[in-house]
Amino acid sequence: GVLKLRAGAVAVLVTAASPVAQMPHTVMRVEATQLLVHEDVRRSLPDLRVAALLEEALSPSRYGRHLYYSHQQDITRCLQGLHGAPGECPPRTWPPPPALSLLQLWRTVDREFVANAALLQPLLDAGAEAFATPLVRGFFGAVDLPACPQVDTDPVQ
């Protein structure tokens, strides 16, 4: 995303991520971020302070822990809500949700849960949706569960 300041702008990049879940599309955890600071920002003490706070807030080693994203799936909503009414479980044969483009993804996410919504707005205003990846703060994990054994319904003879 991009943060516009008085003297210039700061761009925030995710520079490393690791996969943490398949739902069915990959969910990634942010492992490293980097700020690209305009040279005019470096000469403005108030802007430099804001940039330092932003760097600390988004750094996975500081306050930016638990940031996740998916390039193909809306992770701001539960899977049940993507397939029917909120809270309803989908049938066992439900198909996985289709992969979304980043433009479709941005149009479908619940912005209340997008941690970097304000940073993405300048990109969206410029028509650069392809670079606007919504980040969600929270926790994602996956557990492999064994398949349920088939129950024989015929009475024993």
Image (tube, rainbow, N blue to C red):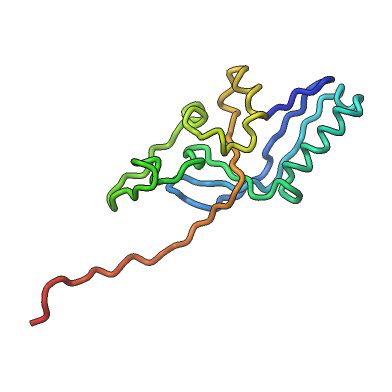
Left or right of residue 2: residue 82 = left
Q: Is residue 132 above or below residue 16?
A: above
Q: Is residue 143 above or below residue 124?
A: below
Q: Residue furthest bottom?
A: 157
Residue visible at 60% across and 28% down in the picture: 131
Q: Give the position of the N terminus as an image quadrant.
A: top right
Q: Residue furthest top?
A: 126
Residue 142: percent from the left, percent from the top? 49, 57
Residue visible at 61% across and 45% down in the picture: 137
Residue 115: percent from the left, percent from the top? 63, 38
Q: Give the position of the C terminus as an image quadrant.
A: bottom left
Front one among 56 and 133: 56
Residue visible at 66% across and 44% down in the picture: 16
Q: Is residue 2 above or below residue 79?
A: above
Residue 26: percent from the left, percent from the top? 50, 46
Left or right of residue 135: residue 59 = right
Residue visible at 75% across and 23% down in the picture: 4
Left or right of residue 23: residue 96 = left
Q: Please tell me in which quadrant of the rendered image residue 47 appears.
A: top right
Residue 43: percent from the left, percent from the top? 92, 25
Q: How many marks?
A: 0
Q: Please tell me in which quadrant of the rendered image residue 146 appears.
A: bottom left
